[in-house]
Image (cartoon, rainbow, N blue to C red):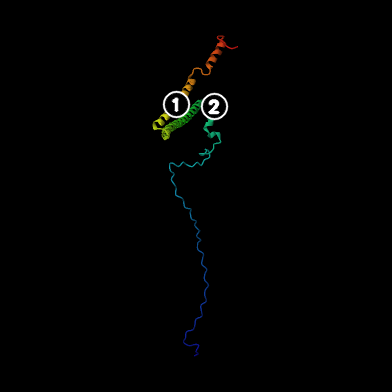
């Protein structure tokens, strides 16, 4: 028997590879879009005014050009004439209040000015006393103290007497009945018109 045909098992021929079967396409699932997230509903506060989506009525702060939205344009002439006295009275009251406020401010300023003048006069009086004392001390360096004091006192008395005489003359000129003869001139003119009395031709 040939060696080739021995007890060894014969080799099997390789099995041909079967081609792979294509996979069947499964059902196509549509792509789902994400839904937009809804914003939480905000509760409207009682103080927030509702939105005005209608343009029939004008918004707040908007200039009203149409006369139908202006209630004043609907007033008649008689209504306007009836409101005129009240407006005049209100205007007069406002003017009086303004005048009172102005006079109050002026009176306050006048009072403050008078107080300042009084204070200035008081300080001037004390300064005059100091100057008198200084004059006495200066004269005491040359003359005796009693003589220096007497001289200063006599000088002050003469100055006071002079000012008093000038003031009296001014008062007499201001309080006279007819300083410039105006009253007498008027009386003569009246008598001349009546044909009574003496008058110049």
Question: Which residue is denoted by mark 1 in the rendering?
Answer: 158
Q: In this view, does 201 lie above or below 149?
A: above
Residue appearing at x 53%, y 30% in the figure: 74
First reached walking from the N terminus: tag 2 or tag 1: 2
Residue closest to the eye, 122 or 155: 155
Mark 2: secondary structure: helix
Residue appearing at x 44%, y 26% in the figure: 158
Q: Where is residue 72 in the image (x, y as percent from the top left)?
A: 52, 31
Q: Position of residue 106 (x, y in %)?
A: 47, 30
Residue closest to the eye, 164 or 86: 164
Question: Which residue is denoted by mark 2 in the rendering?
Answer: 77
Q: In this view, does 146 lie above or below 16?
A: above
Badge 2 crowding class, 10 Å Cα cut-off, few under 14, some 14 to 19, many 20 or more, is few
List the single residue furthest toward the front. Answer: 143
Q: Where is residue 54 in the image (x, y as percent from the top left)?
A: 52, 40
Q: Position of residue 10 (x, y in %)?
A: 49, 84
Q: Do the residues labelled 2 and 1 touch (CB within 8 Å)?
A: no
Examine the rendering and report whether any part of residue 123 can be seen.
no
Badge 1 crowding class, 10 Å Cα cut-off, few under 14, some 14 to 19, many 20 or more, is few
Q: In this view, does 173 lie above or below 48?
A: above
Judge left or right: residue 151 versus residue 57: left
Residue appearing at x 42%, y 29% in the figure: 151
Q: Quick one: quadrant of the C terminus?
A: top right
Residue closest to the eye, 101 or 124: 124
Examine the rendering and report whether any part of residue 147 can be seen.
yes
């Amino acid at each position: 028997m040939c060696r080739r045909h021995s007890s060894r098992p014969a080799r099997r021929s390789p099995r041909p590879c079967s081609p792979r079967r294509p996979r069947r396409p499964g059902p196509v699932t549509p792509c789902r879009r994400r839904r937009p997230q809804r914003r939480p509903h905000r509760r409207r506060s009682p103080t927030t005014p509702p939105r005005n989506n209608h343009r029939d009525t004008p918004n707040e702060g908007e200039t009203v050009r149409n006369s139908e939205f202006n209630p004043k344009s609907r007033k008649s002439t008689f209504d306007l004439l009836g409101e005129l006295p009240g407006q005049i009275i209100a205007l007069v009251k406002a003017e009086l209040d303004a005048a009172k406020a102005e006079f109050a401010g002026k009176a306050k300023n006048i009072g403050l000015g008078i107080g300042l003048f009084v204070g200035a006069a008081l300080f001037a009086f004390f300064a005059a006393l100091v100057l008198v004392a200084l004059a006495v001390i200066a004269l005491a360096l040359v003359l005796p103290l009693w003589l220096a004091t007497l001289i200063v006192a006599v000088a002050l008395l003469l100055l006071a007497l002079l000012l008093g005489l000038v003031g009296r003359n001014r008062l007499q000129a201001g309080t006279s009945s007819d300083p410039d003869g105006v009253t007498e001139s008027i009386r003569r003119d009246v008598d001349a018109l009546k044909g009574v009395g003496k008058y110049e031709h």
